[in-house]
Image: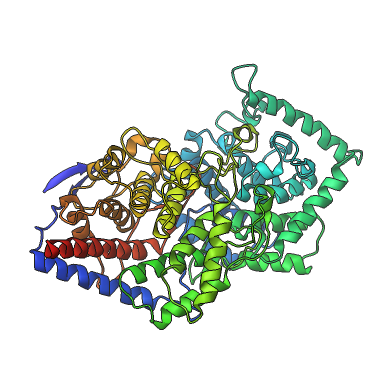
Amino acid sequence: MRVLIDSDSRLKPVASAPASPKPDEFFFELQAAIKRSQDFLLSEQRPEGFWVGELMVDSTLVSDMVAYHHWNGSADKEWQRKAVNHIFSMQLPDGGWNIYLNGPSEVNATIKAYLALKLAGVPVKDPRMLKAREVALHFGGVPRMNTFSKLYLALIGLFPWEYVPTIPCEVLLIGKWFHVNFWDMSNWSRGMIVPLAIINHFKPTRPVNVTLDELYPDGIHERDLALAPDPEKISLRNFFLWLDRLHKLAEWFAEHSIHPFRKTALKKCENWMLERFEGSDGLAAIFPAMLNSLIALKALGYPDDHPQVVRAAHELKKLEHEEKDSVRIEPCFSPVWDTAIVAICLRESGVPAEHPKMKQCAEWLMEKEIRFAGDWIHKNPAKVEPSGWVFEYNNKWNPDVDDTAMVLLALRLIPTDNPAKRDECFKRGLKWMMTFQCKDGGWAAFDKDCTKNILEKVPFADHNAMLDPECADITARILELLGYEGWSGGHHQVRDALDYVKAQQEVDGSWYGRWGVNYIYGTWQVLRGMRAMSLNMNEDWLQRGKAWLESVQHDDGGWGERCNTYDDPVFKGQGPSTASQTAWAVMGLCAFDDPENPALKRGIEYLCRMQNADGSWTENETTGTGFPKVFYLKYDMYRNAWPLLALATYKQIRERATAKKNVQ
């Protein structure tokens, strides 16, 4: 038995991987694993034709809802009991709470959990609370929380509004002619900030019967409440801090009804928000925007029985999973994304085209196409027929490039009784997606060229999500699609995209993964995309990517990486092996068409060995990314979908190699 040091620096024994099976046994095990996985995924399809897995996140969503209910005067003792159980179930041995499974304690998650528990009546002398308090103070306490967290504290009277960075309603009045305007913010930030601007205007403080005085390490002093300026006197940060003080003065005039633009700006924010309720499962169909919009409606004076308030509360409630003794909350739902991925996996693994569940899936996806010119037109005014797909069930204002690319990869494979309809849908979606290529050749998730770094200096931008940068993983996925569709490397958009991907390669040969954890995700997607483009995989830059993947394979044959790689790349490729990340690495190595590669075969053996009897895989790590360093997701569908695609891809290259041998 060997001993290795895991990424959490704890020594742990690792059993040696079993000896490799004989060739015939190996192929039999591969085929059996594929069949079990197919059967499992087919059994998971919903009656309507889609797949959806739960999105598992940290404790902050439940903590926020506890605080909201106390602000709203709607705290239900039974629901709160379940919330307390959930929050305590996620407390770490050191007393804090983290933002990804098996990660270290984090200041915002810890203080939010502590506050929620205190609001729910848990005594501060409870040993678990004392440990939490110690961790919170170690991090610097309340002063070290981010702006949005402080704003929630201000709502219940636990942080002074004068030290919360201003989010002015007037941001919606700034035209696109200005260098930096509202539409230069990321899609998800816009959805969060508009209702927060309304809240910022009214400051609807409803004090609660607790304090957080004990979470200020040196007592409550102005020096700890105010945002620290940049040591350099002349800097963008200091300029924005000065501008924030100017906004505070404007807020005083607004409070006394003598602000020249506030009434107009406030009405525009209200109308913008109400307009985007239509055709969506809540504002932007994501938890933060949905919760903020509900608070904003109440701040505007909408009564609890108003249809908009009732609907907003209902959509928010749908995100909850309430059980006998606990309640947890999803940040949103992922049916389109999950359905496209599972459809690709099933078809690539050999599920026949005429299978009725595949046909049903095709119809469901086509019905989810968005034929509406949403908010994307502000950054992408190209004259193109509206199309695109979203992540969630309904969110017509925000179709995105990433989901559209995945759906198009699925539509080219899945059958339908109306192929003309599918072909028209595919062509329309492809044309729409291609107009989103950014100036440097890459693609981002939602918008085009949403990369003005000056926005990251705004005082309320410390949630690390103000921009929507283009990234190698999405760009490579689009190149994968274009390769399958026969686009040549000489096409100007392909050429620019290839140049972008090459420029993003790290010195060690890997690629950063913006939307999955992390370098394994980015490297896999690039290598798979380049293979689909029929590039020479013996080129040095691609071989370096392959060598990096092989260098981080674990002794058990798998691959794993934790979210701490976003904080420090020194942790690249470290962390317990997982089914999803092993599948990504396997597919990256499959791009080189060598089924006899020892690292690749050991990866396949790992996936076969770790499969459960019912065809599923178990995974206890977070491998999805929302906002790097801030918010992560565990896609429950990943552990069962990606391994099937990896096994299927390996089977394909093995069969090609065998056929080539037989011809020779």
- Left or right: where does residue 359 sit relative to residue 168? left
**Front in this rendered view, residue 484 or 258:** 484
Eyeballing the image, is 433 above or below 536? below
- Left or right: where does residue 296 sit relative to residue 616? right
Measured as percent of width and height from the top left, residue 125 is found at 50, 47
Measured as percent of width and height from the top left, residue 188 is found at 61, 50
Specify whether residue 411 is in view.
yes
Residue situated furthest right in the rendering: 258
- Left or right: where does residue 457 sit relative to residue 11? right
Measured as percent of width and height from the top left, residue 191 is found at 66, 52
**Front in this rendered view, residue 257 or 586:** 586
The residue located at (75%, 29%) in the rendering is 245
The residue located at (57%, 43%) in the rendering is 465
**What's the coloring here?**
rainbow
Eyeballing the image, is 262 above or below 62? above
Measured as percent of width and height from the top left, residue 111 is found at 54, 44
